Image: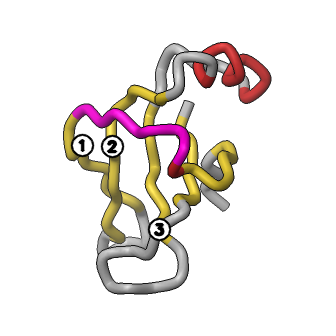
Amino acid sequence: MKLLLHMNMPSGRNDGTHQIILDMPDVFVLANLPSQLKQGYLYGTHITYEWGDNNTRTWSSRGPMIVNFTHVGKIAEYYEG
């Protein structure tokens, strides 16, 4: 499942919101996420996308990422709408 994390820190461009898309294939529904949160961190693959010429997203992996849960403000299922 792709998760959209809203972080409690400014982005690299100093925007007000820092967001990360984290792919966690072991989490199938958002309701299962609290069991992952008990360990104090989230582990997954940091993914990004770029828009293609025909208005499609091309996903790429930036590698594995561990996110300290104390820096996460909100977690939502990533919605491609």
Q: Residue furthest left?
A: 63
Residue at screen point 25% across, 48% down:
60
- Pinpoint residue 79: horizontal percent, then vertical percent: 65, 52
Q: CA distance from mark 3 to mark 2?
A: 17 Å
The answer to whether 48 appears left or right of 17 in the picture is left
Q: Pointer 2 and pointer 1: residues touching (CB < 8 Å)? A: yes
Q: Nearer the viewer, mark 2 or mark 1?
A: 2
User: What label does residue 46 carry, if any?
Assistant: 2
- Give the residue at the far right of this rendering: 31
Looking at the image, which is closer to me, 59 or 63? 63
Q: What amino acid does circle 2 point to?
A: His
Circle 1 — which element?
A: strand
Q: Label 1 sits on what residue type?
A: Ser
SS category of the residue bearing label 3 = loop
- Where residue 61 is drawn, which disc sits there? 1
Magenta range is 64-70
Density class for disc 3 (Cα within 10 Å; few <14, some 14-19, many ≥20) is: some
Which residue does the image show at 25% across and 32% down from the upper left?
Answer: 64
Circle 3/circle 2 CB separation < 8 Å: no
Q: Which mark is residue 76?
A: none
Task: Using the image as rendered, state which of residue 54 and residue 24 is in the foreground.
Answer: 24
Establish if 72 lies above or below 18.
Answer: above
Kindly identify which residue carries mark 3.
Answer: 9
Q: How is the image coloured?
A: secondary structure
Q: Quadrant of the N terminus?
A: top right
Secondary structure, mark 2, is strand
Q: Amino acid at mark 3?
A: Met
